Image (cartoon, rainbow, N blue to C red):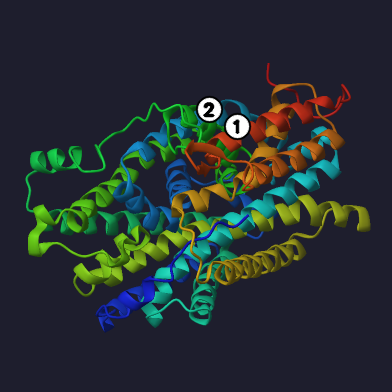
Amino acid sequence: MLQSIDHSSWAPHLMAVAGFGSWDWVIVIAYLIIVIAVGAFVGRTGRSKDEFFLASRQMPIWAVALSVLATSQSAATFIGGPQQAYLGNLTYFAGNLGALIAVIIVGLVFLPAFYRQGVTSIYEIVGQTCGPLAQKCASGMFMVGRVFASGARLYIVAIPFSLIAFGDIEPIQMMISILVIAIGATIYTVLGGIRAVIWTDVLQSVVYISTVIVALIILWNKIPLSFGETVEALQTTSKGNKLKLINTSLSLTEPWTIWSIIFGMSLFNLAAFGTDQDLAQRMLTCRNARSGMWAILWANIVTWPVLILFLAIGLLLAIFYGMPQIMGDAGGTLPDNDTRKVFLVFILEELPAGIRGLMLAGLFAAAMSSIDSALNAMASTSVADFYRPWHRWRHGREPDARVELRVSRAAVACWALALVLFAVGCVIVQHNAENRVSLIDFALGVMVFAYSGLLGVFLTILLTPRGNAWSAIAALIVGFAAVWLMRQDHIRIEVEPDTYRPLWFGWQMLIATSLSVVVCAIGSRSPSQGPKTVS
């Protein structure tokens, strides 16, 4: 399930870089202290059951929107976004079209159902429709997928941290880096719950967006071209037009074609916003479904210009490192032509002291804003889908609020350990790997295993009168298995003689989700069971 990311060539070059200065470390450490302090402060009040996971449904729309933005654009975007444009063109940006389609459907169909049923965990709606066993299986599938995705992101952000802190990426140093990042995000999540997550995400979104703007300004001033000349240079590269926005190719293996975005990435984003507790939980902290819908719409709208910043950096880096005929002696050299480190090398080699520390703070902001929310989301599903039903069965009543708070905090800590273990597993598997893949595709692709089955179940129970416990469980298994099968070496498409590639993960999402819907719909539902379907 894990794809290889070759980073074995990073260390020798970057060890030679004049590393962080004392001011850089002061900025980074001060930032981490501020984030933890803010998280502890904003989460100090309120101990009701709805407070730790739902912030008593009192969060403002704009704060939820920024929190969703910060979570959806993780450290993989911070590093992988510039890499995507450096390596290719702007077709990745068109993926926002799939996200826009998805958030409209979530706002009109999913959120009203969630609020109508008053859920803490969105998988409670599966339980109300298909029974408690199906609810637990859906929640468990989310947990597996979230450990995959967030553990992979924790691993990705540990790479630059280890390089900067230790000068290499040997397993021991990588493991220490993983621990440091995870502990920082866990502390304020344990102390303040979802309220701390949202408000620290607001701070962190401002920090990492600001750092990207600073980096873009500095990089632009290093390019000896006017705006018009820059556009012309990017349109006439040896690899084609790097400003190409729409890819109309019919290839099933080529990434970010307009067809795979409409039919595949729209489903992926529908699953992300509608069936993933990590993002859906933020919307449930709003006062009502209408407010939640506006929050995700604004999050999507703000994502467009922010993503342009990351991609613009990648395009300018393509000139800075890849066009010596333009840059001359003023250009840089990308060691070993490893595109994964293109933005990191620029940060370490070209930015002045202090700014380097600010950039690393921005990287940590992107990392912690996705890890903290994942921890709270997995803790909320653990409590709502497993602990509360067990307590009602065992004691015949709802758990006491104070006891549940202690259980919730313990769950956050346990899931933090799970993410650390998965990230450490990535270190072991990926050490000295030879196969290189895009960081963006790596971070997104691992979640398809869980998303396809979950989306199949949710679409069936919300849009049709079909689905029961066993068909829902079967749909979750079929979705996971279908993705696994499509990633096997013997299931590849020949793109040229003796060259085979797997289906791009957007098409995998479409196929696996379709199979899951069919399987889930086989089961018949009792007329009196579950929420009303959408007509």
Residue occupying image coordinates x 79% and y 60%: 400
What kind of residue is marked 1?
A: Leu
On the image, the x and y values in percent for residue 98 come to 47, 32
In the rendered structure, which disc, 1 or 2, sits on the residue that comes first in sequence? 2
Few, some or many C-alpha atoms within 10 Å of disc 2 (few <14, some 14-19, many ≥20)?
A: some
Residue receiving disc 1? 510
What kind of residue is marked 2?
A: Phe
The reply to whether residue 115 is visible in this rendering is no
Q: Quadrant location of residue 250?
A: top left
Residue receiving disc 2? 263
Tell whether 257 sits left or right of 322.
Answer: right
Badge 1 vs badge 2, beta-carbon distance below 8 Å = yes
Viewer-side residue, 151 vs 530 = 151
Viewer-side residue, 345 vs 418 = 345
On the image, the x and y values in percent for residue 531 come to 76, 28
On the image, the x and y values in percent for residue 213 come to 24, 54
Q: Is residue 322 above or below residue 96?
A: below
On the image, the x and y values in percent for residue 77 come to 41, 52
Which corner quadrant holds the C terminus?
Answer: top right
Few, some or many C-alpha atoms within 10 Å of disc 1 (few <14, some 14-19, many ≥20)?
A: some
Residue occupying image coordinates x 66% and y 64%: 415
